[in-house]
Image (spheres, grey):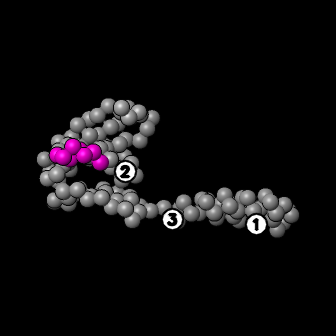
Amino acid sequence: MALSVWLAVLTGALLFGAPLVMVTSLSFIAAVFLWDVWGRPRGGLDFASTDLTWYKGNRETAIPCKAIEQVRLYEHTENPDRALVVLHSGQKIPIRVECTPPSLTALKTPLNAREIATRKGHFWPFKL
C-alpha cells in the first residue's frame, strides 16, 4: 500500500506538477507506512517443557513453570485480551498483548497441561 502511495505521489509530481510541499508531506506519510510494514518485529508465545517464554522483536522474557502460581486471563469486548503471570513470590508480570493468541481460551490448554492454574480476571482499566 505504501508503495502505491509513493507511486501516486511521484506520478502526481511528474505529470500534474504537484506542489513540492504536498509531495514531501505525502512521501513522509508513505515512509511511515513502509517502516511499519517492513520494520515490524514479530511477537509470540512459546511453551517449552520447563519454561514459559514470550518475545516481541528483540525482547524476550522466560519464566520457569515452577515459579508460576497462576495466570490471570482478562477478556474484554472493546480492548485486546490480556494475560498476567503471577509468581509464587507475589510478583505480577504482564504478557505483552502482541504475544498472546487472538483468543485467550487457546492459552488455557497448554497452561493446564503444565499444571499451571488459570483464573479469569475481570477487566478494570484503572489500577487500584
| Three-letter amino acid code at the position of disc 2 | Arg
Q: Where is residue 128 in the image (x, y as percent from the top left)?
A: 36, 32
The quarter in which the N terminus is drawn is bottom right
Q: Position of residue 51 (x, y in %)?
A: 20, 58
Q: Residue furthest right?
A: 17
Quadrant of res 24:
bottom right
Pointer 1 residue: 10
At 18% across and 57% down in the image, what residue appears?
A: 64
Among numbered discs 1 and 3, the one appearing first in the sequence: 1
Image-based side of 18 in relation to 26, left or right: right
Which labelled disc corresponds to residue 96?
2
Disc 1 to disc 3, how far (Cα)? 23 Å
Pointer 3 residue: 39
Residue 56 included in the magenta stretch of the image: no
| Three-letter amino acid code at the position of disc 1 | Leu
At 17% across and 42% down in the image, what residue appears?
A: 117
Residue 89 included in the magenta stretch of the image: yes
Residue 30 vertical position relative to residue 87 in the rendered view, above or below: below
Q: Could you classify mark 3 by the number of other residues whose Cα lies within 10 Å: few (under 14), some (14-19), or many (20 or more)?
A: few
Q: What is the span of residues highlighted in magenta in the rendered image?
A: 86-93
